[in-house]
Amino acid sequence: MMEEQLKHLKQLVEKNLEIKTENIKNSKFLCVASGKGGVGKTNFSVNFAYTLANKLDKKVLLIDADIGLGNIHVILNIPLIRSLKDFFEGKKDIEENIISVKGFDLIPGFSGIDNISELEEEKVVMLVNKLNEISAKYDYIIIDTGAGIGKDVINFVVPSDKTFVITTPEPTALTDAYSFIKSLYKIYNYKNFKIIVNLAKNEEEAYETFNRINTSSKKFLNLDLELAGFLPISENLKKSVIERKLICEEFPKDKFSEKILYIALKETGEKVEKRDLSFFEKFLSLITGRV
């Protein structure tokens, strides 16, 4: 039943999604997704957007596309004066819903569903097309999707340039992340995944976690995944979340913030500042050919 629903969504995307590539220019569409909730997906999205904008001087648009469960405005501690809901209800054009916060642009999401029509696939497809029309203004458009593989998530992931899949070492998180990748790859032939291991106790645990999911992917899908980086457990992150502040702004020297910057530098292709690499990073540089 699930496979039939996904095939239906594939047909819908192929029929209605008309990407205007001439408008994209140098901007990149990056999705942030996860197989399950509670793995730190949105915290990564917000801090990643902040780092790209403020540390690397990129023009960034962050979209809270967790339909009906959006909470980026809560993390940023800003009032919800406009959101995607206005666009879906036809009250405002997409550009009217953009607000500037902490050096980057944001289209907030919303919580709660008043009308099931808000979830119609056609509206998500229309949103993606609208984003293409304004994409030339940005270096990066980051789409923080909902957890799992719902119809709205699929419509955002399929046309994106790449998707960061957030997981943790927890077995259920890994299983769900693999299922997410498997579904997108087998049904849509989408393969632009980059893995981020969050809440890792140390580098060894992060690599072991990545190796487990990559081994399964290579064995059963013949798909070799890429590790974008890992994010360590951080007490400052917990403190920042409680106080509704961004760890990359409040604690730029924290290991978590440094790893976000490292991921951002690799994404932009900019030179990573020379420093003494750890054993883990040296190992990754050898097997991936990256510095």
Image: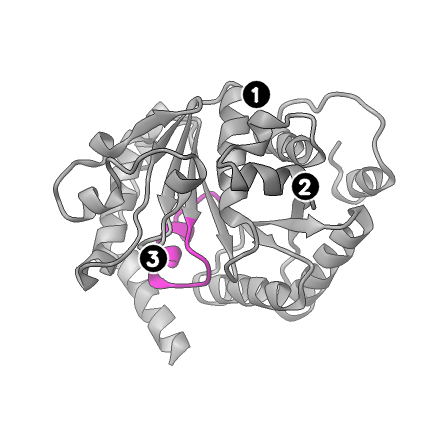
Please say if 109 is above or below 93: below
Q: Nearer the viewer, mark 2 or mark 3?
A: 2
Residue type of the residue flagged with mark 1? Lys
Residue at x 68%, y 41% (from the top left corner): 235
Q: Quadrant of the C terminus?
A: top right
Residue type of the residue flagged with mark 3? Asp
Taking depth in this image into account, of 266 and 206 the one nearest to the observer is: 206
Circle 2 residues within 10 Å: few <14, some 14–19, many ≥20: few
On screen, residue 40 versus residue 273, left or right, reads left
Residue 167 shown in magenta: no
Q: Which residue is the site of mark 3?
A: 152
Q: What span is colored magenta in the figure?
A: 145-164
Circle 3 residues within 10 Å: few <14, some 14–19, many ≥20: many
Residue type of the residue flagged with mark 2? Glu
Please say if 230 is above or below 138: below
Q: Quadrant of the N terminus?
A: bottom left
Q: CA distance from mark 1 to mark 2?
A: 22 Å
Q: CA distance from mark 2 to mark 3?
A: 33 Å
Could you say where residue 99 lies in the image, as x and y percent from the top left? 31, 28
